[in-house]
Structures are given as structure tokens and as C-alpha cells.
């Protein structure tokens, strides 16, 4: 069996994987779905958040595993797992990108995200003047992120979203 490390996207936390974790575990896999800094239940101040902080957190998770992992990145998580692969290639069996960003060397997440002219989310996102924080109006959340989810899942997600 394998170890899966599931890296969530922006504004979400590891808890967004709560339905997939038991399915993988039922098949005998080990699953880790950490919260990135300032996401989910993590209380890191926004001022301390950076791509490097995200990468460092995932590297810590990989360092705690006993075998190479299947590293899964969703959305913003794709940019993170790409950099983690540079730092910990021997600790990764496979990289999996799910509607994820794949940055070129030197690119930043927000400018690449802003290049997506067909995005439903971007024109509706609320981005701070210094471009350090992005939030999403509650009115678009179901259509933007949770179209196929139950109302209970949407309600839970709304409670757990962070800037």
C-alpha cells in the first residue's frame, strides 16, 4: 500500500479531504492531509505566510513518513508540490496535480492565477491592495468551488475557509 499526502488549495485546509481520506484508508493506504500555514486550523499569522512557508510545512510532513509518498496538490497546492519535489525528490513516489498550478521557475502564484482569463473565480475574488490576501464572497462559493457538493458540505466549507 501507499502513503498519500494531500495538499489543499488556497483558502482551504486539510479538512476538505475528509471524504477521500477514509476511502483511501479503507483500501489500506496511509493518508496525511495537513493544514498549510494560516489555513484550516493552523494559526500562523497571515504576515508569516509565503510559498516557502507552505513548502517547508510539506517538507516536514514528508520527513515524518517512512516511505516515499504519492504527493497530491489541488489548485494552489500544485505550485507547492512542485517546489517540494525539488527539495525532497527521493521522498516522492509520484506527483499528482488536481486542477492545479504548475509554475515555472521564478513565477509567483497570484500573477499566474491572474493570467487565467476564463476563470469564474478570479473576477469575483477580493484581492487586497498589496495583493497579499485573496478572499471570496460567500455568494459565489457554491458555484465557484462546491457545485457538486451537498448543502452540508458547502456549509462546512464556508465555516472553514480562510483568507
Image: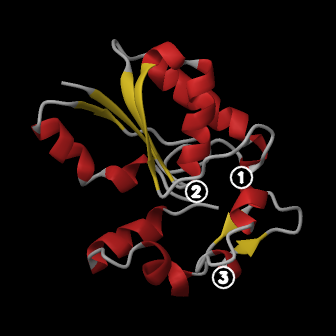
Q: Name the colour scheme.
A: secondary structure
Q: Residue 66 in the image: x percent, y percent?
A: 34, 12
For the point 58% across and 80% down, which residue is it? 120
Report if the CB atoms under discs 2 and 1 are less than 8 Å apart. yes
Circle nearer the N terminus (3, 2): 2
Nearer to the camera, 123 or 61: 123
Circle nearer the N terminus (2, 1): 2
Q: Residue 53 in the image: x percent, y percent?
A: 68, 34
Give the farthest residue toward the bottom. 139
Looking at the rendered structure, which numbered label has been put on residue 53?
none
Nearer to the camera, 137 or 78: 78
Looking at the rendered structure, which numbered label has been put on residue 124?
3
Circle nearer the N terminus (1, 3): 1
Q: Residue 123 in the image: x percent, y percent?
A: 69, 81
Residue for badge 1: 109
> In whole angstroms, how far apart are the C-alphas of marks 1 and 3?
17 Å
Amino acid at each position: 500500500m501507499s502513503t498519500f499526502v494531500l495538499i489543499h488549495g488556497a483558502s482551504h485546509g486539510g479538512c476538505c479531504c475528509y471524504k477521500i481520506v477514509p476511502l483511501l484508508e479503507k483500501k489500506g493506504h496511509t493518508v496525511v492531509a495537513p493544514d498549510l500555514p494560516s489555513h484550516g486550523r493552523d494559526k500562523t499569522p497571515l504576515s508569516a505566510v509565503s510559498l516557502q512557508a507552505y513548502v517547508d510545512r510539506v517538507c516536514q510532513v514528508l520527513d515524518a513518513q517512512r516511505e516515499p509518498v504519492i504527493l497530491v496538490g489541488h489548485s494552489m497546492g500544485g505550485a507547492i508540490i512542485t517546489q517540494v519535489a525539488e527539495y525532497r525528490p527521493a521522498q516522492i513516489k509520484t506527483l499528482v496535480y488536481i486542477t492545479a498550478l504548475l509554475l515555472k521557475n521564478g513565477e509567483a502564484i497570484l500573477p499566474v492565477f491572474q493570467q487565467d482569463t476564463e476563470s469564474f473565480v478570479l473576477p469575483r475574488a477580493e484581492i487586497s491592495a498589496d495583493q497579499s490576501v485573496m478572499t471570496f464572497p460567500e455568494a459565489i462559493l457554491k458555484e465557484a468551488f462546491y457545485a457538486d457538493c451537498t448543502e452540508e458540505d458547502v456549509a462546512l466549507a464556508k465555516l472553514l475557509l480562510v483568507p
